[in-house]
Image (cartoon, rainbow, N blue to C red):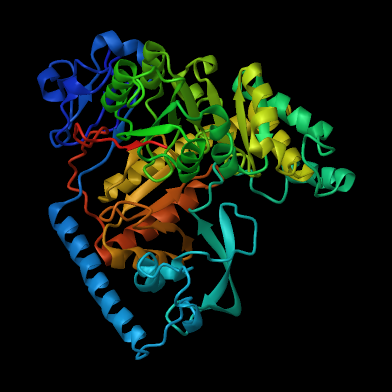
């Protein structure tokens, strides 16, 4: 069931779907929830869907409907998926046995015989999955493209004669493949138009490389202009840009926290956030994905008990979340996170890598999406690699925070400055979104992305696929489950000129392999209809339409007292 403004409860209640087994009254701030069937006199629900509504005293937290779904894996599918991985594992050990006795040729890197007493460079067991499972479907990844990664791409055809251990190019180019894999949310990854023209002009004037760090002689006037524009775009005092999105997280979190600090991290946070937290030396505790009860439990314990052994108060408590989670397609429950952050006086680090430009009526990200005050977020992080069609990332917030990072962040002190044409791409695309270019192109693209997202998700659900995430998220995971279907789906789609990204274990839970579609404003309705037709065809071929039309709620995972782990350094 999709809730539109017309079907939104009259008193402003927030309608959301949560998972089987969760007790709504225990869900953090939303403590007084009621089953939809108990309120049928006021609201209409689909008979096969289970929904919960926020109590009226929390209506002010959400200014718009917030609908997410994570349909439970069918039992038969789960059993067959485990069996599939079990069979592959058995055959993997058999093939390793044959390789050990040189019956089967081994293509992997191995230690030399004369180095057998040295500390091993290659951990044989750790590479088991790569050797025996990943290699079977390796042709679905690292496909080289030879065009702009726009709504359509050109792919270089390649073939393997040794079961995906090596590839060779055939010389043929597969043209006009509909691109459902790139993070080109607003369609700015293009080689024509104002962004491309501006980048070309700046390249002629400044060149491509800066050959220095910002602190030495690599600080250009365009760098300063870009950072002022980013701060204005986000509605904060100051901002700072970095040349790599991953390093923006992994190198700045250690500058903000250290020993004696506590980081509360969502269990599905990106690897860059996880690495940054580990490098910081802080204590890390992980809360269940988007589960406010789990987060509040950790905050209470942190306040009551303090640091381990000494029980001294924590120097800082930093909550780390993402705007859109790139594998789940879910949106952070930011109003509730901010309410908890204020209640327990913690700090909030928000990673808007996928949400900036892609959410909100003005494209200003998840803060804009919920209509919140940017000043309530202590550290705003985002990347330019997705909605802006460029590269790098930023940190934004109070002026004191940015001045501190300029001298303490490893990514700021030691990294080479951003390339001038990349900077110009960011400036031009951001001005376009803000309307400062004198046109409505940016606003039109933001609106088109929202329309494409709703349409694509709705059609997939109607076809019977299990789709994860928020209904407004342009990241659309479609569940495949079984390992054999990961490779089969990617290959069959490419045969029909549709390029998709497929993801499996260990990037996802073992029974939750999926295809991940990324919707773009550059996709026309004809492109989406063509892609949907092919997805339906391949879904019938591979029997992927698992949905039983029992949409389970968004906070789908039942609460467990042992749901988090401690990492004490």
Q: Position of residue 93 (x, y in %)?
A: 27, 76
Q: Residue at x 71, y 41 (%)?
A: 414
Where is residue 278 shown, x and y percent of the image? 46, 40
Name the residue furthest top.
57
The residue lying at 47 percent from left, 61 percent from top is 498
Q: Is residue 11 visible?
A: no
Q: Residue furthest left?
A: 38
Quadrant of image for the N terminus: top left
Left or right: 465 with respect to 338?
Answer: left
Determine whether, in the image, residue 539 is placed left or right of residue 256.
left
State the count of labels.
0
Question: Residue 290 at x, y = what percent?
Answer: 33, 31
| In the foreground, 545 or 564 | 564
Task: Please name whichever residue, 303 or 360, is drawn nearer the observer in this view of the structure.
Answer: 303
Please tell me which residue is depicted at 28% across the width and 12% down the height of the picture.
10
Looking at the image, can residue 100 be seen? yes
Note whether 245 is above or below 163 in the view shown: above
Q: Is residue 475 above or below residue 364?
A: below
Q: Is residue 424 above or below residue 203?
A: above
Image height of 258 relative to 144, above or below: above
Seen as rendered, the residue at the extreme bottom is: 103
Which of 96/338 is in front? Answer: 96
Which part of the image, by quadrant, shows the C terminus? top left
């Amino acid at each position: 069931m999709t809730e539109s403004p017309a079907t939104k409860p009259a008193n402003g209640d927030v309608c959301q779907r949560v998972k089987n087994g969760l007790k709504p009254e225990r869900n953090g701030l939303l403590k007084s929830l009621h089953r939809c069937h108990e309120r049928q006199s006021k609201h209409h629900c689909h008979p096969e869907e289970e929904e919960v509504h926020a109590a009226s005293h929390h209506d002010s937290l959400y200014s718009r409907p917030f609908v997410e779904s994570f349909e439970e894996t069918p039992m038969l599918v789960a059993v067959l998926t485990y069996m599939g991985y079990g069979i592959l594992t058995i055959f993997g050990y058999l093939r390793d046995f044959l390789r050990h006795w040189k019956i089967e040729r081994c293509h992997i890197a191995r230690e030399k015989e004369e180095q057998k007493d040295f500390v091993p460079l290659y951990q044989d067991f750790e590479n088991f999955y790569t050797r025996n499972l990943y290699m079977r479907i390796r042709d679905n990844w690292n496909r080289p493209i030879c065009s702009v990664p726009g709504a359509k791409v050109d792919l270089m055809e390649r073939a393997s004669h040794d079961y995906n251990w090596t590839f060779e190019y055939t010389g043929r180019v597969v043209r006009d493949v509909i691109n459902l894999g790139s993070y080109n949310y607003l369609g700015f990854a293009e080689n024509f138009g104002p962004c491309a023209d501006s980048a070309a002009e700046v390249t002629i004037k400044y060149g491509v490389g800066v050959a220095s760090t910002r602190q030495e002689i690599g600080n250009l006037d365009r760098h300063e202009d870009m950072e002022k524009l980013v701060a204005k775009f986000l509605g904060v005092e100051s901002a700072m840009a970095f040349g790599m999105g991953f390093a923006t997280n992994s190198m700045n979190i250690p500058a903000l926290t250290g020993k004696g600090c506590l980081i509360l991290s969502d269990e599905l946070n990106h690897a860059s956030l996880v690495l940054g937290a580990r490098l910081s030396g802080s204590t890390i505790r992980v809360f269940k994905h988007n589960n406010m009860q789990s987060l509040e439990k950790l905050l209470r314990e942190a306040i009551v008990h303090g640091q381990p052994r000494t029980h001294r108060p924590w120097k800082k408590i930093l909550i780390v979340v993402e705007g859109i989670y790139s594998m789940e397609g879910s949106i952070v429950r930011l109003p509730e996170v901010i309410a908890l952050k204020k209640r327990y006086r913690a700090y909030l680090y928000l990673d808007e890598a996928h949400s900036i430009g892609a959410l909100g009526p003005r494209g200003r990200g998840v803060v804009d999406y919920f209509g919140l005050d940017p000043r309530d977020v202590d550290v705003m992080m985002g990347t330019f690699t997705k909605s802006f069609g460029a590269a790098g990332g930023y940190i934004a917030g109070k002026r004191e925070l940015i001045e501190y990072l300029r001298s303490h962040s490893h990514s700021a002190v030691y990294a080479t400055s951003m390339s001038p044409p990349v900077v110009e791409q960011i400036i031009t695309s951001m001005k376009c979104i803000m309307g400062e270019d004198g046109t409505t192109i940016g606003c039109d693209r933001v609106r088109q992305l929202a329309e494409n997202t709703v349409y694509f998700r709705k059609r997939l659900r109607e076809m019977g696929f299990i789709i994860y995430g928020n209904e407004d998220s342009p990241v659309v995971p479609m569940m495949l489950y079984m390992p054999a279907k990961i490779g089969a789906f990617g290959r069959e789609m490419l045969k029909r000129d549709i390029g998709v990204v497929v993801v499996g274990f260990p990037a996802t839970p073992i029974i939750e392999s999926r295809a991940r579609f990324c919707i773009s404003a550059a996709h026309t309705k004809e492109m989406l209809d063509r892609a949907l037709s092919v997805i339906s065809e391949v879904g019938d071929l591979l029997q992927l339409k698992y949905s039983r039309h029992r949409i389970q709620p968004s906070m789908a995972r039942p609460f467990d007292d042992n749901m988090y782990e401690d990492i004490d350094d």
